[in-house]
Image (tube, rainbow, N blue to C red):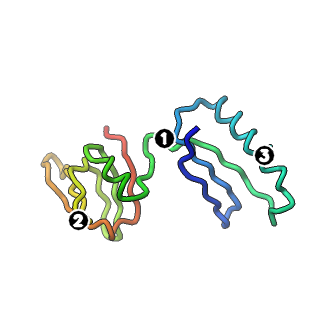
Amino acid sequence: MKLFEVTYHKKDATLSVLLDEKLNMDELEKISQEISDHLDRFEDEFDDNYLLDVSTVGVERPIRNEEELLEAIGAYIYVKTKEREYYGTLKSFEEGTLLLETKDKNRTKDVSVDYGQIKKIRYAVQF
């Protein structure tokens, strides 16, 4: 299995385990049970109860860093900044700037986005 990310969300006491695999529900259930059984051996070390959420990253997987962004060149992505949201094809990423090919009504246009201004970025499904 390839582990994508593990996060603990203190607000709702959820331990999220994201796997970078294509799995069906039966496989996810089995893996979740195995992780739960393993964590139960350390239950005295946890202050509170928590919810274990095991899932796959899916097709709209997050893009977490510049290296993954470079791997996404040519892909259709979603980008959210403080001011705007964009859907488009990532044409390039150079010197801290993304170049996206977006559609505005029926017109295609290129948009530059400063990497430092991005609040959220992920792959997207194009319809």
Q: Is residue 79 above or below residue 37?
A: below
Callout 3 environment at 10 Å: few (<14), some (14 to 19), or many (20+)? few
Query: Percent from the top left, x then y, of residue 55?
Result: 60, 43
Labels 1 and 3: the sequence-earlier one: 3
Farthest residue toward the right? 44
Taking 26 as reference, is 82 left or right?
A: left
Mark 3–mark 2 Cα distance, whole angstroms, equals 44 Å
Give residue 58's mark: 1
Mark 1–mark 3 Cα distance, whole angstroms, equals 25 Å
Going by the numbered disc 3, the residue's amino acid type is His
Taking 112 as reference, is 33 left or right?
A: right
Query: Percent from the top left, x then y, of residue 1?
Result: 59, 37
Which image quarter: residue 76? top left
The residue identified by callout 3 is: 38
Q: Residue at x 38, y 52 (%)?
A: 68
Q: Nearer the viewer, residue 9 or 34?
A: 34
SS at circle 1: loop
Query: Percent from the top left, x then y, of residue 112?
Result: 20, 62
Query: Percent from the top left, x then y, of residue 32?
Result: 70, 40
SS at circle 2: loop
Q: How many marks overall?
A: 3
| Mark nearer the viewer, 1 or 3 | 3
Give residue 125's mark: none
Q: Nearer the viewer, residue 109 or 30?
A: 30
The residue identified by callout 2 is: 95
Going by the numbered disc 2, the residue's amino acid type is Glu
Callout 1 environment at 10 Å: few (<14), some (14 to 19), or many (20+)? some
Report the quarter where the C terminus lies.
top left
Labels 3 and 2: the sequence-earlier one: 3
